[in-house]
Image: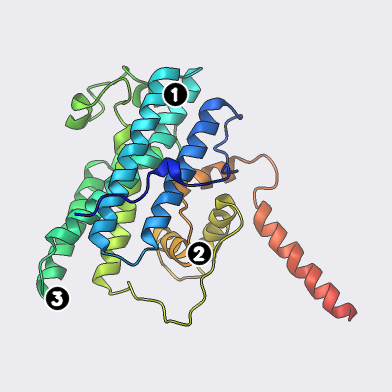
């Protein structure tokens, strides 16, 4: 077994500039820095050309270490108000935990997948059915979360406020209630399952292909919010036919070496803008028109 080569805290980084709709504060700054370091460390591992199973083990180790640091910070500092607590357990903690669920699922899939094309396909289809079963069993919560509802957030994302009538998972009663609410894990599961579904479908469709030796690596240098705005615009216009938004997002992540995290929530923030809700698209239009005008003058 190969142990993790990196510790997430050892990676050099610049403070991530994306914000989650809250005013700058110590919690927000700590979280942004921590998440950015984790994603950078994961990226550093993933670009190495070694055994994929070993890399997954190392990534899982990094995420567990990161969660431990976040838990220590939260227990020592606490939250300044209810809004900050809800935001953490509804969006921030699930963004990290979802990575753990995803990589652990991929690890299990890769270590248990049988040899042979037919057997492997049967196995992967059974895994897809498990995801569908979770979706069917939690349909109402899916609707609540994905439509950015908040009317019962005080019961779902505040510690010690659980309601047994809200279909609680058994795992909640086994967790540390100082660092858990009744539904933060379920949010993480939703985020992870979307990613697991794309991973399995890629395996089934043989879409995981190596780039040709002379291919060029492209890195997205704009913000994650800008890319999310572009992806939703292309999806809304049907630029890729009936392709699911998740598949489009994962393709962009892979192509441009970026992790979008919870892009559903980012889109909700775009919708909530009071002015200029298509800021990035407008800037693209202006830049193109400017270039055309400049070339007309030549």
Residue 78 can be seen in this image: no
Locate residue 277, reporting x and y percent.
Answer: 65, 48
The mark lying in front, picked from 1 and 2, is 2
From what the image shows, is residue 167 above or below residue 147?
above
* Residue 219 disc label: none
Callout 1: helix, strand or loop?
A: helix
Residue drawn at 23 percent across, 52 percent down: 105
Q: Report which quarter residue 43 is drawn in.
A: bottom left
Q: Which label's residue is closer to the chain start, 1 or 3?
A: 1
Residue drawn at 55 percent across, 52 percent down: 224
Locate residue 176, reporting x and y percent.
Answer: 26, 23
Callout 2: helix, strand or loop?
A: helix
Residue drawn at 15 percent across, 59 percent down: 111
Callout 3: helix, strand or loop?
A: helix
Dot 3: within a 10 Å radius of its alpha carbon, few (fewer than 14), some, or many (20 or more) residues?
Answer: few
Comparing 58 with 28, the one in front is 58
* Residue 256 disc label: 2
Q: Which residue is mark 1?
A: 85
Comparing 220 with 249, the one in front is 220
Q: Is residue 119 left or right of residue 237?
A: left
Q: Which label's residue is closer to the chain start, 1 or 2?
A: 1
From mark 1 to mark 3, how far is it between C-alphas? 47 Å
Dot 1: within a 10 Å radius of its alpha carbon, few (fewer than 14), some, or many (20 or more) residues?
Answer: some
Residue 260 can be seen in this image: yes
Viewport quadrant of the C terminus? bottom right
Q: Which residue is mark 3?
A: 117
From mark 2 to mark 3, how far is it between C-alphas? 30 Å
From what the image shows, is residue 196 above or below residue 84?
below
Viewport quadrant of the N terminus? bottom left
């Amino acid at each position: 077994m190969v142990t993790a080569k990196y510790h997430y805290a050892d990676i050099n980084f610049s403070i991530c500039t994306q914000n989650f709709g809250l005013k700058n504060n110590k919690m927000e700054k700590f979280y942004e820095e921590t998440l950015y370091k984790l994603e950078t460390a994961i990226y550093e591992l993933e670009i190495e050309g070694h055994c994929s199973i070993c890399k997954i083990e190392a990534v899982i180790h990094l995420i567990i270490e990161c969660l431990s640091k976040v838990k220590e910070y939260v227990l020592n500092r606490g939250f300044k108000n209810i809004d900050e607590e809800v935001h953490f357990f509804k969006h921030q903690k699930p963004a990290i935990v979802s990575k753990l669920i995803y990589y652990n699922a991929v690890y299990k899939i890769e270590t248990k997948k049988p040899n042979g094309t037919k057997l492997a396909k049967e196995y992967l289809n059974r895994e897809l059915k498990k995801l569908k079963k979770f979706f069917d069993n939690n349909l109402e919560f899916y609707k609540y979360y994905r439509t950015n509802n908040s009317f019962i957030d005080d019961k779902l994302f505040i510690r010690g406020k659980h309601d047994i009538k809200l279909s609680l998972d058994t795992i909640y009663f086994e967790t540390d209630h100082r660092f858990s609410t009744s539904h933060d894990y379920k949010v993480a599961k939703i985020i992870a399952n979307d990613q697991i579904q794309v991973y399995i479908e890629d395996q089934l469709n043989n879409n995981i292909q190596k780039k040709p030796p002379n291919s060029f690596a492209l890195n997205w240098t704009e913000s994650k919010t800008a890319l999310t705005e572009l992806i939703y615009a292309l999806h809304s216009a049907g630029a890729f036919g009936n392709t699911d938004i998740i598949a489009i997002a994962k393709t962009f992540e892979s192509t441009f070496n970026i992790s979008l995290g919870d892009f559903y929530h980012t889109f909700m923030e775009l919708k909530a803008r009071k002015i200029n809700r298509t800021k990035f698209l407008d800037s693209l239009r202006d830049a193109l028109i400017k270039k055309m005008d400049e070339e007309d003058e030549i």
